[in-house]
Amino acid sequence: RRRLTQAAAALHAAAGVLRSEPAMASAARSLAARAEDLAGGRFTMALFGAFSAGKSSFANALLGEEVLPVSPHPATAAVGRILAPEGGFAHGTASITMKRAEEVWEDILHSFSVLQLAPPQHDSWTAAVARLQTGGLHPSALPHAGFLRAAAAGWEESRPLLGTERTVSLAEYRSLVADEKRACFVQSTDLYYDSPLTRSGIVLVDTPGADSLHARHTGVTFGYMKNADAICFVTYYNHAFSKADRSLLAQLGRIKDSFALDKMFFIINASDLAADEAELEEVKQHVAQNLRAGGLTSPRIYSVSSLLALEGKSSGAREAYEASGFGGFEAALSEFAGEELPGLSLAAAKDSLSSVRGRAEEWQRLALMEANQQEEGMKQFRQRREAANLRLAALEQEDRPLRDLRREGAELLYHVRQRIAFSFGRSFQESFHPSILREDGGNLKDIFIACGRELERSILRELEQELWATTLRLESAGRRFVTQAAIAAAAGLSIPDQELQLLENPDERWPAPAKLDCVLAPLDWAGLWSRFRSPRHFFEGPGRVEIRAAAEPWFKEVVAAAVQGQEDSLLTFYTDAAAVALSHAADRLREGLSEQEAAMSALLKGGDGAQHWGRIAEELRLQEQTFVEI
């Protein structure tokens, strides 16, 4: 924070020096504001993992107090933030945002659909839930049955509160998030809690478990992965990676290259359960292997005991804290938040100051010219300026970057289809598993159809995750093509690349789609039942091969149709964003040229001379030295 505060002061000083250069002064102030935000603003750390991973106990260990209930309901947890008291919210109070009535109804309809039940009526759905039988259900459907029973039990109490926001005490908050019949109606929670962690500006975000009903809302999960400053993936020491865990890890692997920094931390919780160091190392290797399978080749893995860390922090027992392994993780997090992340802003600020100093030195050189040389220079500049107006108008209308973006986008979406195709075998095997399709498992036909529906849901989730990851790649490609076009235009206008970088707006964010609506036409699994015959015929005979061969053409067709259904809207969305970015780039180049013309005019009229610009260059050099010292 001290370094960032110093950097912000240096940038504000530079902006003051540049009063006669509005665009450059504005760029310096913008960078100063970013440094101030990092110095005094929030640092968001999102927690991911299954419910049994111990995310709540890990959060408690970070906070140093037992704040969160450690056993929330696994099916319906809401997004929960923990942050420092602010805006009239006192320590130990929570803001509760309830789902809207239509959102609750959407959840109910979805769960009825997963359970292969007829769509319910508004006035009789609770009665239908009361008759619900769970025998023979696919394991992935059981949380939906639990959700419906909890929602029916809490319906009368929570219905009047839907769509509202209210403030509750810490005791009420704990009761609410731990009681499934109330928690299932909550959209999100903000708990305001004063602790060393929150006081430092860190905001903890507890995301719904990888195995929750909310896992179908892939856009919500993606948003936290994309926008959080740091990501902690928590897994429990003696738990195998679930299918949902692997899905989350695969998504992290897809988007890791889009981050300027590696912001991911992988936590093995409850390391105190290890019999010895050799066993703990074996678990670490198992976790590392799963991470590499998800495309995470150089993960930062920390084995910790949240229980011992909480004991050490709350009672001051240093030995317990040291034994917890938390020290290594918290030191790494501190280095990331205090060194690596601010380093990006510090480097950008230093480069910008260097660019501004170069401009001041150029004006100093011009001021030292003879008057006739200055007049000739101004004449040449005005001739170039007329051509520049035409060139920048052409830049705004340039369609090559948009065509290149569409071409690359189409290629990206082709590879989405290819990667989904490669995953079909694994998804099929996981959905039609011997532990589910057993002679003693109940109605085998119903279970077989449920396995097929689970395969459909798995494919849909993976497709949506691939498409969300593609939005990052499309944005990156769009920025690249726009920058290339702007650099080409700047070169034609004799504007150095260094100066172009200064005119870029570091806070300019590209929009992202609000949602992706993918639909897969269902397969008639009942029509394939005759090929199943029995578990033995399916798993030991030709049944599995025959059914997979019958399902694969459907799979390829529906995935191709779903991707094609998204392709035009996605490419149009990002080419529109690129067109806006081209216009902004042209405006910034115009602004820079206008400043050059104003400065040259001032020189001809006997305005600021070489001494003035030399003094500015020297002051900027001093500010650059401040960054070296920082």
Image (cartoon, grey):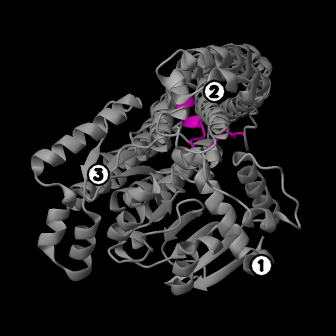
Residue 363 in sight in this render: no
Left or right placement of residue 97 versus residue 363 in this view: right
Of label 1 and label 2, which has the lower sequence position? Answer: 1
From the top left corner, tell me how far across and down residue 504 is, in percent. Answer: 59, 36
Of label 2 and label 3, which has the lower sequence position? Answer: 3
**Residue ID at (64%, 42%):** 443
Mark 2 to mark 3 CA distance (whole Å): 39 Å
Does residue 6 lie above or below 620 as drawn?
below
Corner quadrant of residue 106:
bottom right
Of label 1 and label 3, which has the lower sequence position? Answer: 1
Residue 249 - label: none
Q: Is residue 457 magenta-colored?
A: no
Mark 1 to mark 3 CA distance (whole Å): 40 Å
Nearer to us in this view, 266 or 289: 289
Does residue 67 lie above or below 204 as drawn?
below
Left or right placement of residue 547 versus residue 287 in this view: right
From the top left corner, tell me how far across and down residue 618 is, in percent. Answer: 39, 44
Q: Nearer the viewer, mark 2 or mark 3?
A: 3
Q: Amino acid at mark 2?
A: Leu
Does residue 132 lie above or below 377 as drawn?
below
Badge 2 marks a residue whose secondary structure is: helix
Corner quadrant of residue 431:
top right
**Residue ID at (32%, 68%):** 61
Query: What residue does disc 1 label?
Result: 156
From the top left corner, tell me how far across and down residue 423 is, in percent. Answer: 53, 23
Query: What residue does disc 3 label?
Result: 238
Considering the image in quadrants, where does the N terminus appear? bottom left
Badge 3 marks a residue whose secondary structure is: loop
Nearer to us in this view, 226 or 359: 226
Span highlighted in magenta in the image: 500-513
Query: What residue does disc 2 label?
Result: 474
> Disc 2, disc 3: CB below 8 Å?
no
